[in-house]
Image: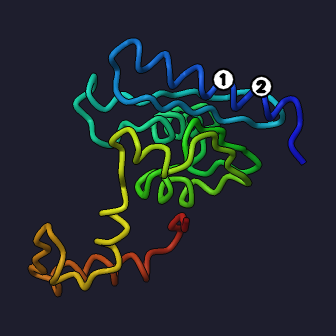
Amino acid sequence: MITEKDKQFIKRAIELSEKGMNNNAGGPFGAVIVKNGEIIAEGFNQVTSSNDPTAHAEVVAIRKACENLGSFQLDDCIIYTSCEPCPMCLGAIYWARPKAVYYACTKEDAAEIGFDDHFIYDEIEKNIKNRNVKFINLDREEGRKVFKKWGAKEGRIDY
């Protein structure tokens, strides 16, 4: 059930998308993260202003929320975003483990203005040898030694 508070939070995400766009920070995307009915973090796209391709609104907000909570997970949090998350943000959202995501525009709406992520979904489905960016496996056994140490590490923090 969508509440008046949900509508206020999605409106704030949309306002942030416009704020970032008007400040030439990046594309027209905004996000807020809410816990217990209160905004704990906000973000808007800062890709071009920070020269950081990972500075999408959701990632910016997730980083701030986790810092504010002192946790790498967003337990009992809700993300409100001005647009359906791209594949990178979707991955970050799943790793952060919020309980829900509300979004305004769809990925089809984003594609209409030049933010089309369909090629990434296509790439994920391809065999790694057939991707447009070359992926070269190098020194796997040396890397696996550290993985084995992780597997045996006592007191590690699993996530």
The residue lying toward the viewer, choosing from 51 and 81, is 81
131 left or right, relative to 104: left
> What amino acid is found at the position of numbered circle 2 in the picture?
Gln
Residue drawn where x is 36% and y is 44% of the image: 115
| Tag 1 near tag 2, CB within 8 Å | yes
Seen as rendered, the residue at the extreme top is: 23
Q: Quadrant of residue 36?
A: top right
List the residue tagged with mark 2. Answer: 8
Residue drawn where x is 22% and y is 81% of the image: 128
20 left or right, relative to 129: right
The residue lying toward the viewer, choosing from 140 and 47, is 47
- Marks 1 and 2 sit apart, C-alpha to C-alpha, by 6 Å
List the residue tagged with mark 1. Answer: 12
Q: Quadrant of the C terminus?
A: bottom right
> What amino acid is found at the position of numbered circle 1 in the picture?
Arg
Residue drawn where x is 72% and y is 35% of the image: 34
Q: Position of residue 37 (x, y in %)?
A: 83, 32
Q: Is residue 126 above or below residue 157?
A: below
